[in-house]
């Protein structure tokens, strides 16, 4: 008896996205999804003839920042999907892959360029580096 | 609780000042279909979602909307940053300047300040989620209007991106709506009767349904909790 599989969402299988959503090939890559603002190929809908902006990294910091943003976006997209489809095992697997990658990239970025959250390792004994620049709304501190 | 992450969800780097555009864009900050209204709408409605699915989705989308508030605010800030007083007057932002100088303030494009009357909570999941679906569609439409009003690629890029987010959120809300609609139709109206499960509700549900058929379409989250509760094992 599958007592813990309490969430029977079989009926959802017949609605909107589930036919393709069990097939990860219908997802954009994190890079492409991030550029578009949408990880789900069947949900993407272009406005007029506008193409998504191409994001270009000009240096190592921007490259790492961009890569982190892409993977963070992909795991967030799957988070929202899994909220409504919590028993989709292939999506859970993919979410965990992205989530782990996001943690690795976050750590790597922070080691070089400072903390992204106040809980990150961020202080020497005599300086609290959380306060240091790179507040996200300042121009040129982005990609 | 919420924790701040010191990055934008999508990069914004607008080099060309454009007060006219800043004046329009502010509606996605403090207007009726804006991001602030969206964040507060979902983060407020989530408390009375009838099960964990709805609570999770409204929490997570509401949280993302806060990141969009930050993106829109960043765009307005960068568009206004280098403006001279003359330019501010010419763009009709002198009244804004009188009150706020170049600081941000949530209004719509006509300068009408943000108000919580932009959103509702009824306590009815279908009514609330319908509103959320409509809100996403309206925000998408406003993003399209805004894209039509500019030719600066550094402004268009983030607006296109935010527009897609409305489409994804709409889809998730629609899935949640259909799931609740089906659930309510199947008679699982314990939603209404005991939105906050009590010890007695657990007991009653348990005794009424000794088999606790977890594979049935009319499953109940309450039963799952019961099953996990050591007290009853």
Image (cartoon, coloured by chain):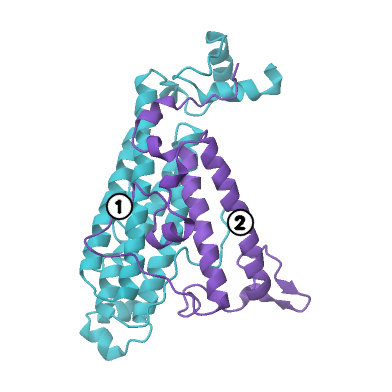
Chain colours: A purple, B cyan
Residue beneath the point at 63% across and 53% down: A100
The furthest residue to the front: A25
Q: Disc number at residue B118? A: 1
In the image, residue A60 above or below residue B30:
below
Residue under pointer 2:
A101
| Front-lying residue, B224 or B33 | B224
**Residue B61 placed where, x, y %?**
44, 49
**How far apart are the alpha carbons under marks 2 and 1?**
39 Å
**Residue B150 placed where, x, y %?**
24, 73
Residue beneath the point at 37% across and 38% down: A17
Give left or right: position of B190 versus A130.
Answer: left
Q: Disc number at residue B138? A: none
Of the residues tagged 2 and 1, which is closer to the observer? Answer: 2
Residue beneath the point at 44% across and 70% down: B11
| Front-lying residue, B100 or B41 | B41
Callout 2 secondary element: helix
**Residue B13 placed where, x, y %?**
41, 76
Place residue A15 in its image quadrant: top left
In the image, residue B140 above or below residue B105:
above
Residue under mark 1: which chain is it in? B
The furthest residue to the right: A125
Q: Label 2 crowding class (10 Å Cα cut-off): few <14, some 14-19, many 20+?
A: some
**Residue B223 placed where, x, y %?**
56, 21
Place residue A38 in its image quadrant: bottom left
């Amino acid at each position: 008896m599958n007592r813990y599989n309490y969430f029977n969402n079989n009926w959802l299988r017949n609605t909107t996205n589930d036919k393709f959503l069990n097939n990860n090939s219908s997802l954009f890559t994190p890079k492409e999804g991030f550029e578009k603002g949408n990880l789900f190929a069947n949900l993407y809908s272009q406005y007029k003839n506008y193409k998504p902006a191409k994001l270009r990294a000009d240096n190592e910091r921007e490259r790492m920042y961009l890569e982190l943003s892409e993977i963070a976006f992909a795991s967030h997209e799957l988070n929202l999907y899994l909220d409504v489809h919590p028993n989709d095992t292939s999506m859970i697997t993919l979410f965990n892959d992205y989530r782990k990658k996001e943690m690795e990239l976050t750590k790597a970025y922070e080691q070089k360029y400072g903390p992204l959250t106040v809980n990150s390792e961020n202080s020497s004994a005599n300086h609290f580096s959380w306060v240091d620049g790179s507040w996200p709304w300042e121009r040129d501190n982005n990609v | 609780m919420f924790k701040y992450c010191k990055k934008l969800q999508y990069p914004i780097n607008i080099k060309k000042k454009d007060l006219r555009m800043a004046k329009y864009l502010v509606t996605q900050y403090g207007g009726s279909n804006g991001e602030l209204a969206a964040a507060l709408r979902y983060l407020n409605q989530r408390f009375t979602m009838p099960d964990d699915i709805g609570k999770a989705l409204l929490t997570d989308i509401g949280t993302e909307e806060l990141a969009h508030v930050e993106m829109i605010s960043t765009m307005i800030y960068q568009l206004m940053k280098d403006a001279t007083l003359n330019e501010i007057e010419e763009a009709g932002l002198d009244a804004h300047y009188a009150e706020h100088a170049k600081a941000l303030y949530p209004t719509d494009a006509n300068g009408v300040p943000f108000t919580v009357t932009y959103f509702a909570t009824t306590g009815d999941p279908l009514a609330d989620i319908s509103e959320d679906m409509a809100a996403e569609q309206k925000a998408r439409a406003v993003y399209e209007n805004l894209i039509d009003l500019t030719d600066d690629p550094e402004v268009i890029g983030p607006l296109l991106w935010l527009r897609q987010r409305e489409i994804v959120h709409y889809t998730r809300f629609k899935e949640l709506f259909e799931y609740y609609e089906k659930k309510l139709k199947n008679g699982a109206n314990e939603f209404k009767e005991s939105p906050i499960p009590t010890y007695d509700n657990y007991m009653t549900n348990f005794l009424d349904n000794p088999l606790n058929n977890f594979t049935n379409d009319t499953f109940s989250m309450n039963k799952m909790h019961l099953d996990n509760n050591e007290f009853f094992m």
